[in-house]
Image (cartoon, rainbow, N blue to C red):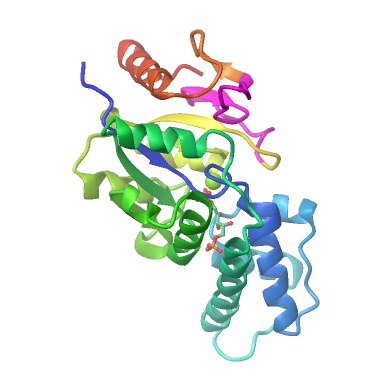
Amino acid sequence: MSKLQALIFDVDGTLADTERDGHRVAFNRAFAEAGLDWDWSVERYGELLSVTGGKERIQRYLTTDHPNFEPPGDRREWIAALHKAKTAHYTQLIEASVVPLRPGVKRLLQAAREQGLRLAIATTTTPANVTALLQTALAPDSLDWFEVIAAGDIVPAKKPAPDIYHYALQAMQLDPQDCLAFEDSHAGLQSARQAALATVITVNGYTQAQDFTGASLVIDHLGEPDLPFKVLAGETGKAQFFDLTLAEFLHNLQHASGVPTV
Ligand code: XBP
Ligand code: MG
């Protein structure tokens, strides 16, 4: 049986709870700055999250909530400019440390580095957003921790399509069965599973009621020695927080059964 070689992480909702107090607030600031009276509430934003990608989310919102709105000039360009303003607000918020990493994230990444496991990121969000979060919340040099940072528009189709995971696997020249993916959402799980990756889910407020059939493990967060995780589905042996022993255990389980464990 092959040894686990790499961990591949989603960003939004997985490394940090960025959606409610980060992305949502940044969208609203960009709307206000553009003179628009749109305001995405916490609840409405939860519904809009069914569309991954910020530009795609604005496009969907226009179609559903403002079907008669005619942006000045080219629609695509107008959305792209509005989204660029949103990215500037988002990176400012993140650089002001409004969103911490989720429990266990830093510990697991540090342990993986110490053990020589390879690391990658596969996310829908814009590259500048990943840079801001990693440098602010993880470590100033942490971009170098990841062999590949696959983000945003570099692939034709965003999650739930598997493209971003295919891109990361191709860049690392790794087979999916040698890796473990970390996600927080149904769309993210679909993306990873379609790329044949065993996947651990850490749920959050926006995703806890979603369907995670096909995941290797579903927990409330990665946990810490003094902050045990809650297991929502799957097998953890005696583990109370997510470490590399548990990562290997799930990897072996997946290989032994050949099928997902949830
Ligand atoms: C994350 C997203 C992103 C962010 C916004 O999905 O859907 O769209 O909400 O980022 P996932 P941008 O965690 O599944 O990758 O505005 O930069 O697109
Ligand atoms: Mg996510």
**Seen in the image, is 126 located left or right of residue 22?**
left
The reply to whether residue 174 is visible in this rendering is: yes
Q: Is residue 154 above or below residue 182?
A: below
The reply to whether residue 68 is visible in this rendering is: no
- Which of 79 and 135 lies nearest the eye of the viewer? 135
Q: Residue at x 62, y 52 (%)?
A: 18
Which residue is at the far bottom? 73
x and y percentages locating residue 12 in the rendered image: 55, 50
Q: Is residue 23 above or below residue 206?
A: below
- For the record, the magenta segment spans 207-231
Q: Does residue 92 belong to the magenta stretch?
A: no
Q: Residue at x 33, y 48 (%)?
A: 146
x and y percentages locating residue 133 in the rendered image: 51, 57
How many numbered circles are shown?
Answer: 0
Magenta stretch secondary structure, dominant: loop
**Seen in the image, is 27 located left or right of residue 224?**
right
Q: Residue at x 58, y 25 (%)?
A: 219
Q: Quadrant of the N terminus?
A: top left
Q: Residue at x 77, y 54 (%)?
A: 42
x and y percentages locating residue 226 in the rendered image: 62, 23
x and y percentages locating residue 35 in the rendered image: 75, 85
**Seen in the image, is 249 located left or right of residue 159?**
left
- Which of 97 and 80 lies nearest the eye of the viewer? 97
Which residue is at the far top? 238
Q: Does residue 224 belong to the magenta stretch?
A: yes
Q: Is residue 39 above or below residue 74?
A: above
Which residue is at the far left? 173
Q: Quadrant of residue 185?
A: top right
